[in-house]
Image (cartoon, rainbow, N blue to C red):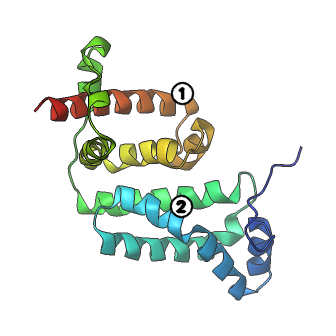
Amino acid sequence: MTPIRHIGMTGFDDIHYVRLVKDGDTNAFVHIVRRYQRMVFTIVSKIVINTEDAEDITQEIFIKIYQSLSKFRGDSEFSTWLYRIAYNTAITEVRKTKREFISFEDMAEKIPDHDIADHIEESSTEERLQYLDLVLKQLNPEDAFLITLFYLNNHSVQDISQIANLSASNVKVKLHRIRKFMNSEINKLISK
């Protein structure tokens, strides 16, 4: 069975444009940029807080993608390959700045499941979004990225494992720990 390819408004799939670029039609790359620039920027902005830095890194990512198109073999969906480049580039940039984030891996393990109350249901949607935004900013960029891909961009665990170069079981464990930590932190904020 042939995998379904992403087909845009023009009716051509990603592979069509990749082939055109590989065959020397550099203008075809514009279609790839248009199709993915918003999503790539969203990924980068979840990892890199500063908007100007996110814009610069997004441009850098598309340069890398263009320069690496010859390496795309079609083993995965083109979008997965592209998002992986975006993720790796953004993470590399964040690591260069040596920012520190909450390491909740150990903290999440210490939070008993029954201690996570559901006070969040009592708050308004606007308040919940504010709490969620505050807690997302506390996460390290890699964990914020995983949560964003899974919940906001509806990627499957399998897609995320390919993009982030993690096993599917590792992605599931990380998502569980992140959710546990986030619930605990949101409940602390609500209780104040």
Q: Which percent across, then down, holds residue 151?
A: 48, 42
Whether residue 3 sits left or right of residue 8 in the image: it is right
The disc label shown at residue 169, or none = 1
**Snapshot quadrant of residue 169:** top right
Query: Along the line of sight, which residue is nearer the eye, 80 or 155?
Result: 155
The answer to whether residue 15 is above or below residue 102 is: below
Query: Along the line of sight, which residue is nearer the eye, 98 or 35?
Result: 35
Using the numbered discs, state the Cα–Cα distance from disc 1 to disc 2 in whole angstroms.
22 Å
Whether residue 124 sits left or right of residue 81 in the image: it is left
What kind of element bears circle 1?
Answer: helix
Q: Disc 2 designates what residue?
A: 85
Would you call the spot at circle 1 few (<14 residues within 10 Å), some (14-19), or many (20 or more)?
few
Residue displayed at 42% across by 62% down: 44
Q: Which percent across, then down, holds residue 180?
A: 33, 26
Residue displayed at 70% across by 63% down: 72
Q: Amino acid at mark 2?
A: Ile
